[in-house]
Image: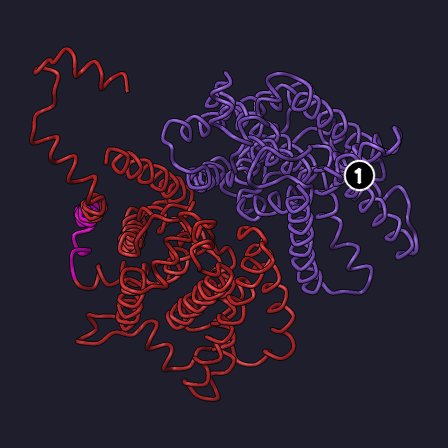
Chain colours: A red, B purple
Amino acid sequence: MSADATSATDVDPGVEPPATRVRAGRYLATHPHLVLVAVLIVLILMTGVIESNYLSINGLRNSALFAVPIGVLAAGQTILMLTGGIDLSAAMIATGAAYVAANQSPKGAVFAIVAGLVVGLIAGAANGVGVGIFRVNPLIMTLAMGAILLGLFTSWAQTIFSGSTRMGDFIRTLGGGSFWGKSVPWAVVVWAVLAVFVVSMLRRSGFGRNLYALGDNAVATRLSGTRPWQVLIVVYTLAGLFAAIAGLLLGGRVGAVDLQLAGAFLLPSVAAAVIGGTSIFGGIGTYTGTILGALILGVLQSMLTFLGAGQSVQQILYGSIVIGLSWLYTRIAATQ
Amino acid sequence: MTAVSQRALVTGTQAVWRRWLRRHGWTFGVWLLFLGLVAYYSTLIPSFGSFQVASIVNNGTPIVFLAVAQAVIVIAGGIDLGVGGLLVLTSVTAARLMEGQSFEVTLVIAVFVLFAAALLNAGIGWIITVSNVPDIVITLGSLYVFQGIALSVLPNPGGGTSEGFRWMFTGSVRGIGSNPWPAAVMITIVVLVAAWWMGKTRSGLSLYAVGSDATAAYLSGIRAARVKIISYAVGGGFAALAGLANTAIAGRGNATTFGGNLTLNSVAAIVLGGVALTGGIGSLIAVIPAGLILFFLSPILTAMGVDPSGAQIIQGVLIVLVMMVTGLIEWRRQRRS
């Protein structure tokens, strides 16, 4: 405030930044995704410099394949974060769904997929009931759900799901296969369809607006006639469904399932939403940003692999990028 | 008005009791639950003696210290996903530096690790206050950074420590025995000092003030940003204590342990200990039994004949139930006022 007052009284044209820069800054503030696009392009080019073979359909396809499970899991995280929630059980839901699908694969692809998705629906709905009706903190509810699912599937793996751990051929094609001369992975098509659904839901539907409203001010939303518990149950169920889809795609790519299948993707899925500009406190964010976040993480993975960086360097860089990008994003958005 | 006058009619001692219960009821309840569980456990297994007590106290030390670290930060209005990473980092750093050293040297190294961790986490706190990015995001990043540094410090499990140092945390030079006293005394003294600092001193109370409303605290003359950084520094110190305890128990360091799971345990422990995740509410004294219960639950369930995966399910359900109960108490309190 004091800075404004001084600049108004003693105007010094030498100190004022040039008009074009002000305009550029303002444009960036209203279109913060451009920064993410720029980061993505720079990362792709840098990876291309490190390994010239990367700038080919094959190289980019590998990055995309890595980004798919993160991006699909992050769809759930994004819609939950809009309401001020989070899903720490997403990775375990994904693993469970893949496990059930692999187990039911001998009974046919459709049955296996449906069985896998049902796992996501049930676990997600349970999360929603806990958060929406019993008002349990989302962090704790989903954390506990993750523990419960791990326990359930560890014991079920010995008993009712003790059969096959190999994914059926159809799901394997869906998760790891490609078409058009092995250029476009099927998993990317699934992700694209899901992305269109999520983006149009958030931007066009009343339910989408409810999510933003609930995250922005839960009391005002309730007083204006929305029943928050209904919205929360639906959104957690939806997030569970997305997690199950991510699990099926990941399981299909890997080919066989175990109970550690998706564990490593949990925190990256949160990171992708955060890098994409979704506020963890709710009310702010888009799925477009999250997609860019997931792609950045996918390219980063390729780059670190080409660099031959050890696990330690990968994790340090990964953490620094989460901190750096979220900081940058907050600064740009704050100038608006 | 009638309710108020009725309450005023309650006799003196009754009023004191009620106020005490209202203020410390949760702490009291968690301690009672812990002691009840220990008593129950002693009837479950054929021989319950000092070895079992020592096993609970010694092996529970890291989770207790990590939960205290998380509690200090959450009370001040933050949340630190990186404490688990810091535990792993301090544990492997200590194990690497202490290998083959005498007791005196290992003590110096321990103090160095403690302060280095406090300083490192203060840096994370500084980034949070300067950047205005939510705590959970920055500390998600710091979790990976700490884990990565830990892997480069000690790529393969190994390292070592002195016998005297192992005795300090486990009551035995071999890290396993039936002497719970060194660990119990250390937890008691360290946590009591921290609880006194947070409850009775000006600088400690400002953590509660900032946690319950940072703007109001700032307007009443507290440097909110500095308080937040202090809370992260103290939390870092406690995470380092947890890491040192870990090294003393195992006698070596292991950087392949994933700190994220340890962090999640610490969050579950403070919730059980009655610390509000929204900040400003909670007691460190209640976090001790909560951490021990969380650690202790699986041996109890094993003794009851539940297999480990069943124990995991029950643990998850219990955490949710506890949260529902707290939610219900809070809801009743709000309706009454």
Quarter occupied by residue A269: bottom left
Residue shown at the point (54%, 44%) measured from the top left: B259
Report the front residue among B136 and A5: A5
Q: Is residue B106 visible?
A: yes
In the rendered view, would you say B61 is above or below A227?
A: above
Judged left or right of residue B13, residue B21 is: left
> Given the image, on which type of amino acid does mark 1 rest?
Phe
Q: Residue B127, image x and y in percent?
A: 40, 29
Q: Is residue A44 magenta?
A: yes
Which residue lies at the image location 43% right of the left edge and 53% below the top edge?
A221
Name of the residue lying farthest toward the top: A10
- Label 1: chain letter: B
Q: Position of residue B229 (x, y in %)?
A: 49, 24
B309 left or right of A334?
A: right
Q: Report the span colored magenta.
A: A41-56
Quarter of the image where one finds residue A133: bottom right
Task: Categorize mark 1 by other alpha carbons within 10 Å: few (<14), some (14-19), many (20+).
Answer: some
Q: Element under label 1?
A: helix
Q: Which residue is under mark 1?
A: B28
Q: Name the image quarter holding the C terminus of chain B.
A: top right
Tell me the quarter of the picture where residue A111 sits.
bottom left
Measuring 17% from the left and 46% from the top, which residue is drawn there?
A: A49
| Residue A288 on the magenta segment | no
User: Could you say which is closer to the camera, residue B173 or residue A285?
Assistant: A285
